[in-house]
Amino acid sequence: MTPGECLFCGIACGMVPSAIVWRDDRVCAFLDARPVFKGHVLVVPRAHVPTLLELPDAETGPLFIAVRRVAAAVERGLGADGTFVALNNKVSQSVPHLHVHVVPRRRKDGLRGFFWPRVPYASDGERDEFAARIAAAMQETAGAAPAV
């Protein structure tokens, strides 16, 4: 599938603008355009992979290492109490490209089961500020500049 045919492929290769928090040769992480809570990140393989079952074994480790690092960066960068990490596989998968949700959580934040509220950013500037905070925390974790 080409970047023009898949939204997440387009974001991962830089053709579609997005608030990127991390990108390397295998994985891209960016803010969800419709966040559950501000700072909600999607982590995707850069290669087009529709579902978890189609993810090559060799790519599983890099993807979930990035998910773990993003979860730590969301907590550190946003002062979150924790994170909710989730993956829809086919059902409720709004974009047919494997993506892992990393949602910042705070105690008593109102998240109940899978009936998620949606909290939009007030502006592109606010969205970009959340992305910058998470990206800075990713850089601290990696010990190197993010490949954005």
Image (cartoon, rainbow, N blue to C red):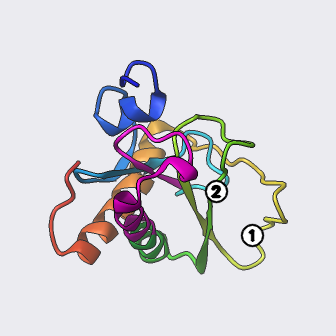
Q: Quadrant of the N terminus?
A: top left
Q: Quadrant of residue 141?
A: bottom left
Residue 14, percent across and down?
28, 33
Q: Amino acid at mark 1?
A: Asp
Camera-side residue: 61 or 72? 61
**Left or right, residue 146 beside residue 11:** left
Residue at 24% of width from left, 53% of height from top? 24
**Left or right, residue 62 beside residue 86:** left
Q: Which numbered circle lies on residue 72?
A: none
Residue 126, percent across and down?
47, 47
Residue at 66% of width from left, 75% of height from top? 106
Magenta residues, start to end: 41-67
Taking 74 as reference, is 46 above or below it?
above
Residue bearing mark 1: 109
Residue bearing mark 2: 37
Taking 108 as reference, is 43 above or below it?
above
In this view, the residue farthest toward the left is: 144
Residue at 56% of width from left, 45% of height from top? 51
Q: Quadrant of residue 22?
A: bottom left
Q: Residues within 10 Å of mark 2 (few under 14, many from 20)?
A: many
Question: Are the residues flagged by discs 2 and 1 in contact, CB closer than 8 Å?
Answer: yes
